[in-house]
Amino acid sequence: MSAPVAQEELPILEAVINIRNRLTALKRDRAEFIKPSDVNALYQAVVKQVTKLNDVRDDNTTYNNRVDTTLADVFSLLSLCYLTLGRTKECPAVYSQLASMRQLLSHMEESGVYNESDLAPFQRRLSELRHIVQQDAESSKHPEAMTKLLERQFNECDVIMRSLQGSLSVLSVELVPIHERLVTIRRQLVALAAKEGSHKAEIKSLAEELRKIDSKRVDGKFLGPGGIMPASQALCTSLIEECFDILQQIKAQDESKNVASSLKPIHDRLNQLRAELENLVLTHRWSLRETDLYNYSMSLHEIDKMRIDGKFVDTEGNRPPGQYVLLYLLRRCYGLIYRLLSSSEPVSEELIPIANKLSTVKKCLNEVYKFGGPFTPRDLYPYQLALHQIDSMRKDGRFVGVGGNIPEGQGIVMAHLNECHELLEMLKESMGENEDDQDYDDEDETETEVAE
């Protein structure tokens, strides 16, 4: 439960709520592109309130009241707005990615189901994001209040990461292959449990593999070379027992019945969110506006808060069957959001349609070049027309947005455009060579006829 808001923080809370409302209105307005000037104004306003908040608070005390939760909402929205504008290499854009990463790492720590290869991408991404923040801090591009906030976020992620790495560090070398295989089997089992229909063949195969791994134990312990008992038995033992537990739940009933009726509304909602997010992963280049991810994040947080001691409970406080399925769906959704945030390109939403069109034209030209000619001017005309239309959108060599602003992503779009022009010129040259060859052949035929 959040702490009460101190009297001196009430004006700050009121201002922050007003900023959140204005950001929400920006997010909802699909009729117009998000304007950098609007986002910058709100960003400066929230930094001002954070500075005031830092002045009335003690740096050594941890706070968690309505001001903090509202600020978290505001920074999430601001961060998504920066991603929408294509400003992915700036401090504010880092916030939502760190928040998503922290959520995923926390769930990994809770489940205990991970290995070194799972942690490596997070370590690399943390390093990349930290570099962005350090560059902004050194150049004073963003206020100190912003970089301090992100540093706290980094520290939280680092604490969880060290804990995860510490758990794996006690794993004996002899048990690493077994542990990694058990992690994979558990993931496959919960994924099957969350799928509709029957999957007897897959489940039978996984059950047989589990029994083979289990048969390697002697008196419940895994042994190394020479009969030596490696350390860290608990990690593998608890994991294999959990796999058998999930296996029994799946075998007991099919998925639709495996989730208790009291948990069905949560299951259906998570299933719907997963389907929508998976669709966005496939179509995000054309349909995603990063600010849309805010609603998904909020929905998942609300569902996550329903858990008591890590489990979903019914009205009587019991823990009905189907926990593994719900947790799988919840974590799957968090993973999809993180994937969408990480894949956000540094191109403003205003330039995304142009970038997508150029990407399509480039693919078509590459395919035409790959399969070769002969070509006629008529074959290449549609591509010339498409590039001419895009070229005509530029003013003084740049693409100009609504209101005369210069959207982010000019370099990327121009690189695509130049590549398309180069490919088109190469095709024209090959078309000219084909015509020369044809003329030469015709001359040979004529000379032969005259000689005859």
Image (cartoon, rainbow, N blue to C red):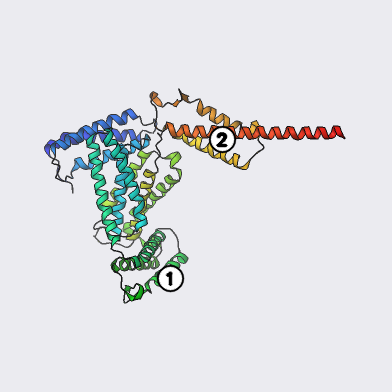
Q: Is residue 77 visible?
A: no
Q: Tell me which corner region of the image, top left, top right, bottom left or bottom right, holds residue 75.
A: top left
**Cα separation between marks 2 and 1:** 54 Å
Q: Is residue 379 above or below residue 157?
A: above
Residue of label 1: 208
Residue in the foreground of this view, choosing between 246 and 93: 93
Residue in the foreground of this view, choosing between 84 and 443: 443
User: Which residue occupies the extreme right position in the image?
Assistant: 452
- Residue 27 is situated, as x and y percent measured from the top left of the image, at 34, 35
Q: Can residue 410 be seen in this view?
A: yes
**Residue 359: mark:** none
User: Label 1: few (<14), some or many (≥20) within 10 Å?
Assistant: few
Give the residue type at disc 2.
Leu
- Residue 53 is situated, as x and y percent measured from the top left of the image, at 17, 36
Disc nearest the viewer among 2 and 1: 2
Residue in the foreground of this view, choosing between 44 and 150: 150
Residue of label 2: 423
User: Label 2: few (<14), some or many (≥20) within 10 Å?
Assistant: some
